[in-house]
Image (spheres, grey):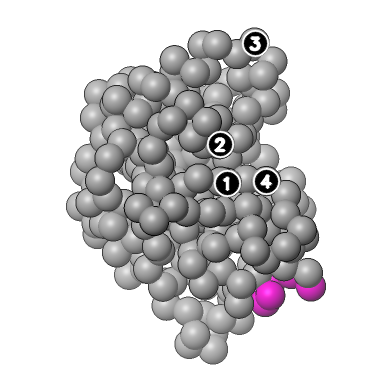
Amino acid sequence: MKAIILAAGRGSRMKGQTEARPKCLVVLAGRTLLSLQMAALKRAGVADIGIVTGYRGEMLRGPGITTFENTRWSETNMVMSLCQADAWLSAEDCIVSYADIFYAAETVTRLMRAPGGMALSYDPDWLALWQSRFADPLSDAESFMLNARSEVIDIGRKVSSLDEVTGQYMGLLRFTPRSWAAIKDFLATLEPMARDKMDMTSLLSAMIKRDEKIVAVPTYPGWGEIDSESDLAYYEGEVAAGRLVLAAA
């Protein structure tokens, strides 16, 4: 199995942290997010890792690194970045990772073993983490509901009640070639501007409406999303206090 890290975006909410580097090169506890991601993926047995580049993409190129360039990264959203890796997605099962998260190898393994075509990881104990990161957890939370078969039936809506949230999607997925083909069929029905602006949860929601099954697997402890400088400070504190253990190098 291969993995694709989506690292094309600017990460403007990180302010000075990303003025001179891509978001995946932000440092947490002495290691870049990219190195944490690659360590977890390799420990889970992922053979090849590719990176979709865009902003400051030259910093992510090097010997032994496969890159897919989104030359229109400033005009497009994450789904169009993912499409740059079509050759990999069409050929075999692929893990897809956002560039601003970190996670344990065990979470990757759970995704690899999930049944069906599309699968994603989520945090069922999300509320405590969101309460630590935000004064109002609902200001950032999105809808996430499952059926009795652990299939996602609602994702990505703005919510006003905790009743609409049974977990939070964390930005780590798995696609098979069949599920990727279904996604391409859907994208082909859209106008170019709609394709360019499509974000990942909107895509997943659209696929659910087309009766595609998306299996959800709970994340293993030791994950986080760094979307702001305050997030970075929070997780630095968690590591220093011994409450957060990062993936081994």
* Quadrant showing the C terminus: bottom left
Contact, CB < 8 Å: mark 1 with mark 2? yes
**Which mark is first along the chain, 2 or 4?**
4
Main secondary structure type of the part rendered in magenta: helix
**Which mark is first along the chain, 3 or 1?**
1
Q: Callout 3: 10 Å neighbours few (<14), some, many (20+)?
A: few
Which residue, given by chain and number where applicable, does mark 3 sit on?
191
**Which mark is first along the chain, 2 or 1?**
1
Which residue, given by chain and number where applicable, does mark 1 sit on?
155
Name the quadrant containing residue 43: bottom left
Which residue, given by chain and number where applicable, does mark 2 sit on?
205
Task: Kindly identify which numbered label has been placed on residue 157.
Answer: 4
- Tag 1 secondary structure: strand
Contact, CB < 8 Å: mark 1 with mark 4? yes
Between 249 and 173, the one nearer to me in the picture: 173
Percent across and percent down for residue 147 are 44, 52
Q: Residue type at mark 1: give it.
A: Ile
